[in-house]
């Protein structure tokens, strides 16, 4: 039971706060580094804008921190609806950057609504979980909550922004699991997601990596065979469900569960392959073997891995990197900021980044336990899941062990929207911590 005492303004998680500030300062340093040429000429003023956004972000973080987080419970539905509306407006009137319509704004000033939608989703899911309580263990309630993920995911996919779209579902799964959802329910959607990825990539993998015809993979490319495969899987699921109802034997449920995963994977992959653009499919494939398209889709991965590996233990020194200063790294101030850090500060610098993110995630988990109500706990779980997902995907992308998805690294990558999203999220964590006593 939590200790009963009055709340003081000095009850503040200084470790969490300083970790965020240090990461932000490092981010500004390396955004500056990314804008310096090999001859020492500064050609970019991105670092100046990042400093301004960082100052505003700190104000937003502290404002949220000293605001009672329960205020956001009442406003959650309205905030979520507003963000969905902004996503629709973005699709209609947004600015196109690098082939994607993701931005709202004028001239050089704008916001990326899909980033702030992550926070709105966390708030509305936390409210939903707080409302249904133990009901989340029931499959219909679990699936009903998942419908909250559908509108933002669909709207962001149309932009298109695959990296951001794939973040929304993990947020719900993390929060639902913390709320008490059955591991079997959460696991089903995790395994189904992996199944969709595998069945989506196999035909492209056969074409560019195997470089030979595979009869098994051919089933996924031809309408007739894939229909037979899908029909067989659906039939197995139906018969297993009937067997469970008639005989009451649990192993029929296991059969239905196991057959449903590839059934979802095959059926969804048909849609996904038709929806994804060729360059997006190649991004997903080249991480298996970047050399299949070294000057195209594999270029980013090859240059990023080269930068990370060339840093060694101590790095080449601040402003002494070659991959970044010779402009070999695309989007080096955003998607590949970690690559520059690893090149110039080496393993030691990269390890320091890992430690700071570990501290943030550790404090988030502790705050989850400190929360005096379930809504606060779910908020902390959602923010922790958000930061963890961005960290793992971005670092994995920079090291070549995950596909390139364009997901920024919170507090380090250039950009006001992701920086403010991360800082507001930490503000929510601080708000929960500040009110941990009854």
Image (spheres, rainbow, N blue to C red):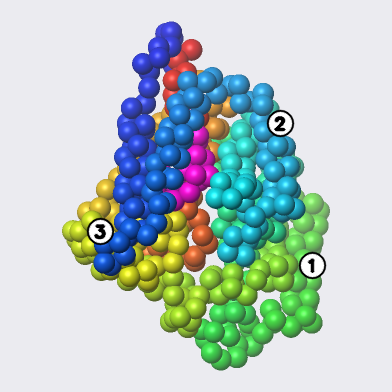
Asked if residue 8 is positioned above or below residue 257 in the image, the reply reads: above
Numbered disc in front, either 3 or 2: 3
First of labels 3, 1 by sequence position? 1
Q: Determine crowd level at label 3: few under 14, some 14-19, many 20+ residues with C-alpha closer than 10 A.
A: many
Residue under label 3, please give it: 319
First of labels 2, 1 by sequence position? 2
The x, y position of residue 212, in whole percent, is 56, 91
Residue under label 2, please give it: 78
Callout 3: helix, strand or loop? loop
The boundaries of the magenta stretch are: 410-427
Q: CA distance from mark 3 to mark 1?
A: 61 Å
- The residue drawn where x is 75% and y is 62% is 237
Residue 259 appears in the figure: no
Residue under label 1, please give it: 235
- The residue drawn where x is 39% and y is 56% is 44
For the N terminus, the image quarter is top left
The verdict on residue 412 being magenta is yes
The x, y position of residue 158, in whole percent, is 70, 59
Numbered disc in front, either 2 or 1: 2
The x, y position of residue 292, in whole percent, is 47, 83
């Amino acid at each position: 039971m939590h200790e009963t005492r009055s709340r003081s303004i000095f009850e503040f998680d200084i470790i969490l706060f300083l970790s965020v500030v240090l990461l932000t300062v490092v981010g500004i340093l390396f955004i500056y580094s990314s804008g310096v040429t090999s001859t020492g000429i500064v050609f970019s003023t991105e670092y100046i804008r990042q400093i301004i956004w960082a100052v505003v972000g700190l104000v937003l973080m502290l404002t949220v921190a000293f605001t009672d987080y329960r205020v956001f419970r009442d406003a959650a539905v309205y905030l979520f609806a507003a963000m969905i509306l902004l996503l629709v407006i973005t699709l209609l009137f947004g600015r196109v950057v690098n082939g994607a319509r993701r931005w709202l704004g004028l001239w050089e000033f704008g916001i990326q609504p899909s980033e702030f939608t992550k926070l709105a989703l966390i708030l509305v899911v936390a409210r939903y979980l707080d409302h249904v309580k133990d009901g989340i263990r029931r499959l219909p309630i679990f699936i009903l909550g998942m419908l909250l993920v559908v509108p933002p995911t669909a709207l962001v996919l149309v932009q298109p922004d695959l990296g951001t779209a794939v973040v929304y579902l993990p947020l719900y799964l993390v929060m639902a699991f913390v709320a008490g959802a059955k591991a079997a329910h959460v696991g089903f959607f995790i395994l189904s997601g992996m199944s969709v990825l595998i069945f989506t990539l196999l035909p492209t993998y056969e074409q560019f990596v195997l470089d030979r015809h595979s009869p098994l993979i051919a089933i996924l490319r031809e309408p007739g065979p894939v229909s037979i495969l899908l029909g067989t899987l659906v039939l197995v699921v139906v018969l297993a469900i009937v067997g469970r109802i008639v005989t009451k034997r649990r192993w029929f449920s296991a059969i239905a569960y196991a057959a449903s995963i590839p059934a979802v994977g095959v059926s969804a992959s048909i849609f996904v392959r038709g929806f994804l653009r060729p360059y997006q499919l190649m991004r997903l494939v080249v991480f298996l073997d970047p050399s299949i398209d070294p000057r195209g889709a594999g270029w980013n991965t090859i240059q990023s891995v080269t930068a990370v590996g060339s840093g060694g233990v101590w790095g080449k020194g601040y402003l002494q990197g070659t991959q970044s200063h010779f402009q070999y790294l695309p989007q080096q101030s955003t998607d590949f900021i970690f690559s520059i850090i690893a090149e110039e500060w080496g393993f030691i610098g990269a390890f320091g980044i890992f430690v700071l993110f570990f501290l943030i995630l550790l404090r988030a988990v502790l705050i989850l336990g400190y929360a005096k109500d379930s809504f606060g706990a779910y908020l902390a779980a959602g923010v922790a899941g958000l930061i963890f997902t961005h960290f793992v995907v971005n670092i994995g992308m920079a090291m070549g062990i995950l596909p390139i998805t364009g997901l920024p690294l919170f507090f380090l990558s250039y950009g006001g929207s992701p920086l403010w999203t991360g800082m507001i999220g930490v503000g929510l964590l601080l708000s929960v911590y500040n009110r941990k006593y009854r």
